[in-house]
Image (cartoon, rainbow, N blue to C red):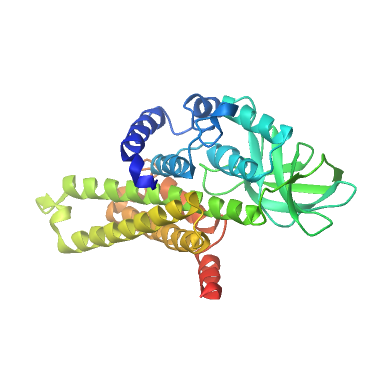
Amino acid sequence: MRTTDFAELHDQMRAVAADVLARGRVVDWSRLAGAGWAGLEVADGLGGAGATFAETALICEELGRAAAATHYLGSAVLAVGVLNTLQDSAVRNDLLSGIAAGWVRVAAVLDPGFTVSADRRLAGHAAFVPDADGADRLLVLATDHTGAEVAVATDGLTVTPQPVLDETRAVATVAADGIEVPEPLRFAEDRGAHRVRDRAALAVACDSLGLAEAMLAATVSYAQTREQFGRPIGSFQAVKHACADMQVKASVARALVREAVAALVHDDAEADAAVAMAKSYTCGAAVEVAGKAMQLHGGIGYTWESGIHVYLKRAVFNRSLFGSPAAHRQRLAQRY
């Protein structure tokens, strides 16, 4: 079944998300778990909903649309993605059950700079790890002594919060200097780690799509009500053209994200190319749309009270998170 077969379910999820996110920009972990979002992709036998990344992508869009400050990206999207890609084990299942119930918050470190030795000593460093600060456990992707990528579930790493301009995101540096860790967890397939990183990039693209569409809607609404020289500014040709350009960018971004989500859900052979196209275009377009929204709002767009700066900062950070547009375009160039 394709993701379009669930249009009615997705509409209901959007309505619920709008209601939850309307209660405040900051959404704590317990509310995420209570809404069932933390365990969307956790198997029903482990207390989750047994859904797919298509449903998770929808929530990512709505979080971007609201510019919500949550632990969803690192503690649900990435952590659950890693755990679902690992071989079955008691540790894996306990963590998935705990995430779905909201009892435990797990963050994932996807940076390839970690190694784990034969005697289970973990060493490495990563920056800009989403939602690592305050997490109960960390899932670290590392290269073992045989050269294979594994995951280590531990809580003994050094985590240092990193201040960034985007106040809706919480990121941190994570470091390990030869600490002893539990037995590494193995991926169920050779490309498991690659799929997890594709998933991370696409989740950020979904977030950028939601915020771009929010900025487009806000700008069109403002252009219809703000008057100058006795007429709405939306009647001026320059404003019409600017809004049309924003609409085109948002529409292309939605098409690319939709195809990438479907490819990832169905494990298509071209999924990595689809993700690279979606991430490179959508995250760049979101910055342009948010910047144009600020400009078309005039002087009020540059004020703190307008809130547009929140979206622009988030869009700029999303553009670099899990691969810049240039990095993903380079992947495409090498592929073709």
Judging depth in this view, the residue of 89 and 59 nearest the camera is 89
**From where the camera sits, is residue 23 visible?**
yes
**With 178 as the anchor, is 198 left or right in this view?**
left
Q: Which residue: 53% across, 49% down?
A: 165
Q: Position of residue 12 (x, y in %)?
A: 33, 32
Q: Quadrant of residue 95?
A: top right
**From where the camera sits, is residue 162 visible?**
no
Q: Which residue: 56% across, 26% down?
A: 47
**With 63 as the anchor, is 111 left or right in this view?**
right
Judging depth in this view, the residue of 317 and 229 nearest the camera is 317
Q: Position of residue 117 (x, y in %)?
A: 86, 52
- Residue 277 in the image: above or below residue 258: below
Q: Which residue: 37% across, 40% down?
A: 305
**With 176 as the anchor, is 49 left or right in this view?**
left
Q: Position of residue 277 (x, y in %)?
A: 45, 63
- Residue 213 in the image: above or below residue 155: below
Q: Position of residue 201 (x, y in %)?
A: 53, 54
Judging depth in this view, the residue of 253 and 321 nearest the camera is 253
Judging depth in this view, the residue of 143 and 185 nearest the camera is 185
Q: Residue furthest right?
A: 119
- The mark tally for this picture is 0
Q: Residue furthest front?
A: 1
